[in-house]
Image (cartoon, coloured by chain):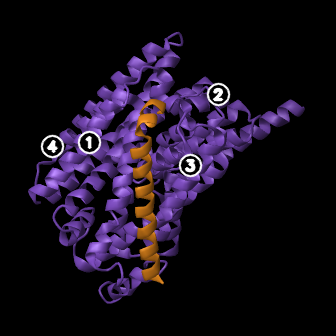
Amino acid sequence: MLGAAVIISCGICVAAGLYVGVMIFREFPRLRNKL
Amino acid sequence: MHWLDWTVVALYIGALVLITVKARRTRLLEDFTVASRDVPRAMVFATLSATYIGPAYTLGIAASAAERGYVWYLIALMVPLQTILVGKWVAPRLREYSQCHSVGHVMGEIYGKPVRWITGILSFLFNSFVVGLIARAFGEVVSNFTGIPAETVIIVGTLPVIFYAAWGGVKTVMLTDAIQFAVLAIAIPSVIYFSGFLFDIGSLAGKVSELHFTWHGGYPPGELWGLFVAFFFGEILLPPYCVRALAACDPKQAGSGFMAAGLYGFPWMFVVVTIGVIGGASLPGLTGDTIFLKTMEMYLPVGILGLVLAGIFGIIMSSQDSCLHSASVAFSIDIYQLIRPDASDETLLRYSQYAVGAIGVIAIIFALLVPGLVQALLIVYTMWAPTVVTPLVIGLLWKGVPKASGLAGIIAGAVAAAIWEWGLGIPYGVPSLVAGLVANQLAFWTVAYGYRKGRTA
């Protein structure tokens, strides 16, 4: 169970990082004006 | 460290500065303080997560987990838990104060000028000390790891932060925070992968004590509850977090951004604690904040080590820039504007930017010269939750709150916390934060009750 929790936690962290990274990459022209 | 790792770190810092320059320079006060209140949910999530995940919630938690194990996951969870609760009930109401630029400003709207003044001064002192403390911790940790003099690290690490915080205000702070979040969220879990324990975590059981896998970690119940309370209230509604709520597009997005950041803390803390336990198993006898970095050094291949170190830089810079920004806004909006109510927005913006530079430089000097900085921070740290937090939450939830009760709560909380901490020497091991909160609430409700009774009579 501990092993599954570690794998899931790492997966969620990396997925969230990728999501935000892609969002910034795609939206940077808009964000730099909007923010 | 290999030259390739240094190249990755240099590229990362260079990219941050380049992105800052590409983002437009702030020309309006509202841009500088609250990003024109136009920050979408995903950005609130990323910037808030990057801000609360500071050195304490990576290097510090990992060091404690190396010593005591997974009980530190439960303790650290208090922070994401309070963030979710704030997102559900407090952040949307905070965002409704559409004319306010800072937490002091909101407190002033609820309780009047004296409370705005006190909150502004507390916020200014707290954030300024945190900038210095992070610079010093950053210098010492990286110096231990790389052998570069701490003074060089403090100066080189803090100057880019001063530059981009002054250049674009909270706009660039949030943009760089989001980038830093992406890097740290991807890079840090790789330590577990390269350690070889990702699919074999059970093998740690024989390498650390059994206490590492218990819910209490060997702490006496009283001390454990003290830690839970201190972690729940210690960082609740700090000024940089309140700015994220004020800057959101609307109350709904403020709330959901906070709740998402809180939910993210659940896997994040688990990853950090697991790295700490791996460090404890791999480097027996080693204690302190460097255990995280030494574990990285032990397992990560060339190139990846640089990427993870860039993630650590991101963790440090994203907390430092937010506190630097909040200190400058507290100075211009809550202190200077009260002295000069007729100051124009242009003047306040200029003073905010000057304040970023001045606070940053003073923080560097303090970090270089003053050994007792931690003690100075603790004084202010002890003062935030027992004074401002509960009157702020009650004021947001109760529209007709009597103004005098806020001031009474703040003064009683500060006095009680100070006496408990330094006068009585923390009796029974109960944190001064708890004593301050109790006194704050007693005074607050006594005055509120007296006021209502006076009105009905």
**Res A19 → quadrant:** bottom left
Q: Mark 4, residues whose alpha carbon is within 10 Å: few (<14), some, or many (≥20)?
A: some
**Residue at 53%, 38% in the rendered image:** B39
Q: CA distance from mark 1 to mark 2?
A: 40 Å
**Residue at 15%, 64% in the rendered image:** B302
- Relative to B20, say whether B222 is above or below: below
**Which color is chain B depicted in?**
purple
Q: CA distance from mark 4 to mark 1?
A: 23 Å
Locate residue B393 relative to residue B170 in the image: left or right.
Answer: right
Indicate the chain on which mark 2 is placed: B
Q: Mark 1, residues whose alpha carbon is within 10 Å: few (<14), some, or many (≥20)?
A: some
**Which color is chain A depicted in?**
orange
Residue nearest the viewer, comparing B156 with B283:
B156
Residue identifier under label 2: B109
Q: Position of residue B329 (x, y in %)?
A: 45, 28
Residue B286 seen anywhere in this rendered image of the structure:
yes
**Res B391 → quadrant:** top right
Residues at marks 2 and 4 touching, judged by CB atoms closer than 8 Å: no
- Judged by depth in the image, the label closer to the viewer, 3 or 2, is 3
Residue identifier under label 3: B257
Query: What's the mark number on residue B93?
Result: none
